[in-house]
Image (spheres, rainbow, N blue to C red):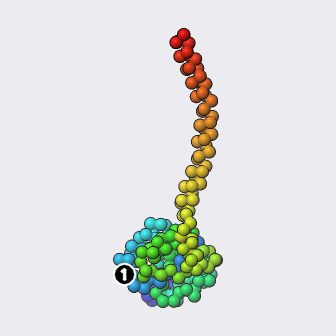
Amino acid sequence: MDRAQKKEWVGSLHQALEATSLVVVTHNQGLTVAEVTALRRKVRDAGASFKVTKNRLTRLALAGTNFEGIDDLFTGPTAIAYSQDPVAAAKVVVDFAKGNEKLVILGGSLGTQRMDVEGIKALATLPSLDELRAKLVGMIQTPATRIAGVLQAPGGQIARVLAAKAEKGEAA
């Protein structure tokens, strides 16, 4: 990378970090290209991003963002996963790390709140933003369905009573 490419890389990473709410820092030593590609695909499917980083350049990109407090985590072969959804990146990385011991989670940050490995794992157990939205829509729709059923019930009861009277009158 020449100086112009480095400056462009730092600028693009800085913009991406400003628009995100969660960063998870990992060591990826020993991962094969196929494993990194599989991890990237899973992360992308979850709506997040995964990037193998250059430590010095990443520290420069972190400057002026909410994630300045995690710059000391960038030693050795590091990679970051980041997302706007505060849970998506953590879920995928923690899930992948369970099946592959070569991916080691170092920590991360949720906004300005620095998180250790246990914090990232706890965050990964929370429902994602899409799951919470689905639950909320379900909760909103359920009362409306119940109200419609209650409002229709008296009309149905009257119809059944009239039908029973008609049957009784025909039988007599």
For the residue marked with disc 1, what is the amino acid? Answer: Thr
Which image quarter is the C terminus in?
top right
Looking at the image, is 22 positioned above or below residue 165?
below
Residue matched to label 1: 32
Please indicate whether residue 96 sits to the left or right of residue 74 in the image. Answer: left
Confirm whether residue 156 shows in the render.
yes
Q: Residue at x 55, y 20 (%)?
A: 163
Q: Residue at x 43, y 88 (%)?
A: 1
Looking at the image, is 40 positioned above or below residue 134?
below
Q: Residue at x 54, y 59 (%)?
A: 131
Q: Quadrant of residue 117?
A: bottom right
Residue 50, position in %: x, y?
47, 75
Q: Residue at x 36, y 80 (%)?
A: 33
Confirm whether residue 18 shows in the render.
no
Looking at the image, is 168 positioned above or below residue 35?
above
Please indicate whether residue 14 sits to the left or right of residue 51 in the image. Answer: right
Residue 80, position in %: x, y?
50, 79
Residue 32, position in %: x, y?
36, 81
Please indicate whether residue 136 sits to the left or right of residue 35 in the image. Answer: right
Q: Quadrant of residue 68?
A: bottom right
SS label for mark 1: loop
Binning the other alpha carbons within 10 Å of mark 1 as few (below 14), some (14 to 19) or many (20 upward) gives few
